[in-house]
Image (cartoon, rainbow, N blue to C red):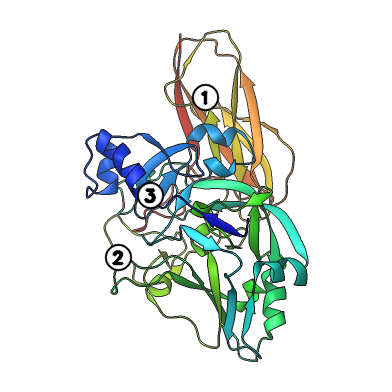
């Protein structure tokens, strides 16, 4: 469609739902979800776990991670700024490339689709704070559980092709990206982030205009989203409208203060401490998640049950997933689903027949082709980032 309109009355719609549960709109998002964990259906989305209305923060329920591909309408939502785009005329929209280039460029969506070769691949998008709720003590920020992630097939054009079209000048060190979202107040820093030029020139970094064969939903970055496979979605700028070629590193709040890790071997500090030195968060680590059964599920003694989920890493690929049904005393290799590419979720499943009644603890542990595996514990960091501890659920056998 040349013109697409997201429901401008979203705030009213969601507000009325919240009011129906007697929740004050001004309440802290985490207080809301702790007191009233509930699902809400935003436009273009099915019911997702609600954290915040402005900016929209929605988590994908665990059950969707039994399959490698996350449906668009079940894909998690994470914005940083409250004023997100809700209406756009593609006939007027342009992608602007400027800065340290031989020429300033403006490209329409038709230009992107006709001037450059289209590419497609599956890649996991994961919020840096996915799993923050499992840290103890809990760091500040949205207390995501497992669902601030999803896997989709992204179709678009190589960023390097677009940059070469504009003509990079010598001395280029970073590429910065800005989207259509805007700060609600003048003092709020615009969400602009940069990436080193050597990463931007890699073949797999693309500007995507399709997600699972359809236009990207508004809440996930319509009409164009930066895809940096293997890196946390912090870098996946939504609704990209401006690309700035830089001859000096970008020094703003989002690059020097936000999304920083302790710069040491464990990327950790003692709880409550501030790191002496920090570094930006970049690559994801190896991880698996159990989708089914869920915590508290009641199973029948002697009846086989399927344990299933997904696993992924930063791009080496998942070699195997190990499952324990006795709290970690013994481990079994799970069956792996189809290979959809090195950046994709990999489905896994394992059948077991409980022989005793009582509580059973099920664990999953992914191993990648570099031999890296999920740890049993990780150190604490102030941002609550990169949680990838062995996943576990507890079920009851009767």
Front-most of 198 and 23?
Answer: 23
Left or right? Give the position of 90 relative to 119: left
Residue at 45% across / 72% down in the picture? 192
Q: Which residue is mark 2?
A: 274
Left or right? Give the position of 190 relative to 362: left
Figure quadrant of residue 39:
top left
* Mark seen at residue 293: 1
Q: Position of residue 191 (x, y in %)?
A: 42, 69
Figure quadrant of residue 73:
top right
Separation of residues labelled 1 and 3 (CA atoms) = 37 Å
Q: Which residue is mark 3?
A: 9
- Please say if 357 is above or below 376: above
Q: Across the whole image, how many numbered discs are drawn on residues?
A: 3
N-terminal of the pair, mark 3 or mark 2, is 3
Left or right? Give the position of 85 relative to 285: left
Q: Position of residue 321 (x, y in %)?
A: 63, 37
Judge the density around disc 1: few (<14), some (14-19), many (≥20) Cα neighbours within 10 Å.
many
Judge the density around disc 3: few (<14), some (14-19), many (≥20) Cα neighbours within 10 Å.
few
- Please say if 273 is above or below 328: below
Q: Position of residue 292 (x, y in %)?
A: 54, 27
N-terminal of the pair, mark 1 or mark 2, is 2
Mark 3 element type: loop
Is residue 184 visible to us here?
Answer: yes
């Amino acid at each position: 469609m040349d013109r697409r309109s997201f429901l401008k009355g979203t705030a009213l719609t969601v507000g009325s739902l919240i009011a129906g549960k007697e929740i004050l709109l001004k309440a802290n998002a985490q207080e809301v979800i702790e007191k009233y964990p509930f699902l809400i259906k935003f436009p273009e989305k099915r019911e997702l776990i609600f954290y915040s209305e402005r900016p929209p923060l929605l988590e994908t329920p665990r059950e969707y991670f039994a399959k490698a591909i996350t449906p668009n309408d079940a894909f998690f939502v994470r914005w940083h700024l409250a004023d997100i785009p809700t209406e756009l005329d593609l006939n007027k929209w342009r992608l602007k490339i400027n800065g340290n280039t031989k020429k300033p460029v403006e490209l329409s969506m038709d230009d992107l689709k006709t001037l450059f070769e289209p590419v497609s691949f599956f890649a996991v998008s994961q919020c840096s704070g996915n799993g923050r709720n499992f840290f103890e003590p809990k760091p500040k920020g949205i207390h995501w559980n497992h669902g601030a992630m999803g896997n989709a097939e992204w179709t678009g054009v190589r960023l390097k092709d677009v940059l070469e079209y504009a003509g990079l000048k010598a001395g280029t060190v970073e590429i910065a990206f800005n989207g259509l979202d805007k700060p609600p107040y003048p003092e709020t820093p615009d969400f602009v982030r940069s990436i080193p030029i050597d990463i931007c020139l890699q073949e797999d970094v693309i500007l995507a205009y399709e997600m699972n064969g359809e236009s990207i939903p508004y809440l996930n970055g319509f009409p164009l989203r930066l895809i940096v496979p293997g890196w946390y979605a912090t870098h996946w700028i939504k609704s990209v409208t401006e690309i700035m070629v830089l001859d000096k590193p970008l020094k703003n709040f989002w690059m020097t203060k936000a999304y920083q890790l302790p710069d040491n071997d464990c990327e950790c500090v003692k709880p409550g401490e501030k790191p002496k030195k920090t570094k930006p968060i970049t690559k994801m680590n190896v991880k698996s998640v159990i989708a089914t059964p869920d915590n508290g599920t009641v199973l029948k003694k002697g009846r086989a049950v399927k344990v299933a989920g997904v696993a992924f890493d930063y791009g080496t690929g998942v070699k195997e997933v190990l499952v324990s049904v006795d709290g970690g005393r013994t481990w079994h290799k799970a069956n792996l689903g189809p290979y959809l590419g090195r950046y994709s979720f990999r489905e896994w499943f394992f059948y077991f027949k409980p022989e005793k009644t009582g509580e059973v603890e099920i664990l999953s542990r992914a191993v990648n082709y570099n031999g890296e595996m999920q740890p049993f514990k990780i150190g604490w960091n102030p941002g609550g980032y990169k949680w990838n501890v062995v996943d576990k659920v507890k079920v009851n056998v009767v």
